[in-house]
Amino acid sequence: MKQLFFLLFLPWMTNAQYNFYYGNIHSHTEYSDGNKDSLSSGVSTPAGSYAYAKGSYHTDFWGISEHNHYNANNNPGMLLSRYADGLSQADNANDNGTFVCLYGMEFGTISQGGHVVTYGSPGLIGWEDIAGSANYDIYCGLNDFTTYWNILNTAPNCFSTLAHPNSGDYNNLLNGAPYSAAADSNIVGTAIRSGSAFSTTVDYSDPPASLYETEYKKCLARGYHVGPTIDHDNHYTTFGRTVQGRTVVLASVLYRDSIIAAYKQRRFYASDDWNTKVHYTLNGQHMGSINTTKSNSNISIAVEDVDMTDHVSNIEIYYGIPGSGIYPSILISNSNSDTINYTHNTIAGESYYYYAKITQQDGDIIWTSPIWINRIATPVSVEEVFTSNNTSNNTNYTLYPNPVQDKLNVMYKSAKQSKAMVRIYNAAGREVHFENITLYEGDNSFSYDVSCFASGQYYYVLQIDHERLIDARFIKY
C-alpha cells in the first residue's frame, strides 16, 4: 500500500488556499441497479454504501447517482419514494470536515441518448408512469436533453457530468449539433475514464478504466467548458476499492457546499494516482477558471507526489481555441521533471484554453481541467504592432511587401547576437510556421515563402525567450 507522507512546505504551493480532496460521484446502490452482491455483502442502501466508501483508502467524498428510472438494466430500480429516501440518507451520513456524501441521479438510457450524472436537481426528473402514477417530480421525455438542460438551470446548485460519452449521445451534443449555451451552463465535466462498472475487485488492483480522452477533446473543441473526471460507475459493493483512480477536487474545506462549489467552478482533475497533487495556474488563476487578460499566458505546473515514489515521466501542455472544432494540440512538453513553466505569446482578440496531461513513470496519467482565457488588447503604438513597408524608429524592423502574395521579407537590426524564434499565426491564432534562428549583431534579413498560405490576415512574431521583438500583422492575398 502507498503510505501517506505529508510535506510541511513547498515553494510552489500556488494553490495554498485550496486543499485536495479525492473521491467519485458515479456509483449505484440497490435503489437502482447497484449492490448486486447485497446478499453476501450485507450492503444495499445508500446509508450502508456511504459507510463502506468512507472506509476506502484516499476517499474524502462520495456521490451516489441512481438511475432515474425504474427498469434500469432489467432490474427493479428507482422509485419516487426511494429518491427522497436517498437524499435523506445522504444528509444523515454527511459529516462535514470528515467525509462528504452526495446523492443524485443518472438521467437517460444508454440505448436512447446516453447517461448524464446530475446533482442538485430540483427533483427526480423522468418520464415513467408506474401503475398509473408518475414516477418523477418533474417530467422530461426520454432523450429530450434540450428540456433537461433547461430544467437543471433553474436550480442554482445543480451541476452535471457526461457519463461514458459515445458518438450521438445527448442529441449529438459532441457530433454536429449546434453549440448549446444551456448545456454548457450546467455541464461541468465529462468522464475521461469510466468503470469498470461491474468489477467485484475490492483490493484496488484493477487496471485503469476505459478511456474517453477523444470525447474530452471534442467537448473542448466544440466550446464546452468542462473538466475531466474519473468515474467508477460501480454496480457492486466496491465503493472506491476497484481502482486507485480518483477525481480530485480543489476546495477550501471538506464541506458539502465547498465540494459542490468546486465542481461548479470546474476546479478538479482526473488522476489514475490516488494521492498525487497537481498545482496548476495560468496568470495566477486556478484550473477551471475563465479569465480575461491583457497579458500573455504564463503557465505554471508543479506535481507533488505524496508518496515520493511516483515520479513524473512527462508533462504535456495542450491548448486550443474554444468553439473552433479543432482538437487541442500539444503546446509544449518536458520529461523527467515535476514542474514546468512556460509563457505562450497570444494574440489580442483571441480566446484559448490550456490543460495539462501528466504521465508518471509507472504509467498513471493525470488530466487537469482547462483554464480558459480571452486575450484583450493593451494600448500600444501603431508602430509596435503593425508595420507596412517602413522602418519604425521604435522597433527598428521592416516587413514587406504588405499585403504579400508570394514572398514575405523581414529586416531587423539587432543590438547583439542571440538565439531567437520565429512564429507565424493565422487569424484564428493557429501557428502555421515555426523556426529557430540566429540573430547577428547589426542588420538581419529573412524571407518566407507564403505562397501556399490561404488568403487572409496573419501575425509575424520574432522573439527571444519570452520577449517579443516583432509583433506585426500582414495580409496574404
Image (cartoon, helix red, strand yellow):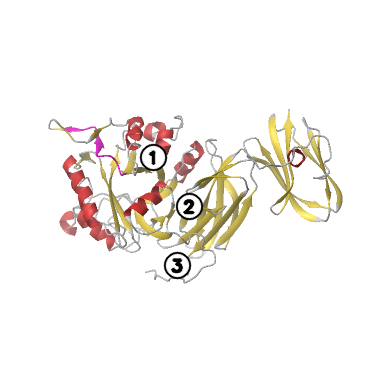
Q: Closest to the observer: 65 or 194?
A: 65
Which amino acid, mark 1? Asn
Give me the C-alpha separation between circle 2 and circle 1.
19 Å
**Label 3: how many residues lie within 10 Å, few (<14), some (14-19) or many (20+)?**
some
Residue 326 seen in render: yes
- Position of 359 compared to 145: left or right? right
Q: Mark 2 touching mark 1, by CB under 8 A?
A: no
Residue 447, how many percent across, how many down? 80, 40
* Element assignment for label 3: loop
Q: Is residue 392 above or below residue 306?
A: above
Q: Main secondary structure of the magenta part?
A: loop
Label 3 sits on residue: 306
Residue 325, how many percent across, how many down? 53, 35
Q: Residue at x 43, y 47 (%)?
A: 265
Label 1 sits on residue: 186
Q: Closest to the observer: 359 or 389?
A: 389
Give me the C-alpha separation between circle 3 and circle 1.
33 Å
Which amino acid, mark 3? Val
Quarter of the rendering containing residue 20: bottom left
Image quarter in which the N terminus is found: bottom left
Q: Mark 3 touching mark 1, by CB under 8 A?
A: no
The earlier-in-sequence mark between 2 and 3 is 3
Mark 3 vs mark 1: in front: 1
Label 2 sits on residue: 368
Q: Is residue 206 above or below residue 167?
A: below
Residue 253, how many percent across, how many down? 37, 59
Quarter of the rendering containing residue 169: top left
Magenta residues, as a range? 119-129
Q: Is 123 a magenta residue?
A: yes
Q: Is 280 a magenta residue?
A: no
Image quarter in which the C terminus is found: top right
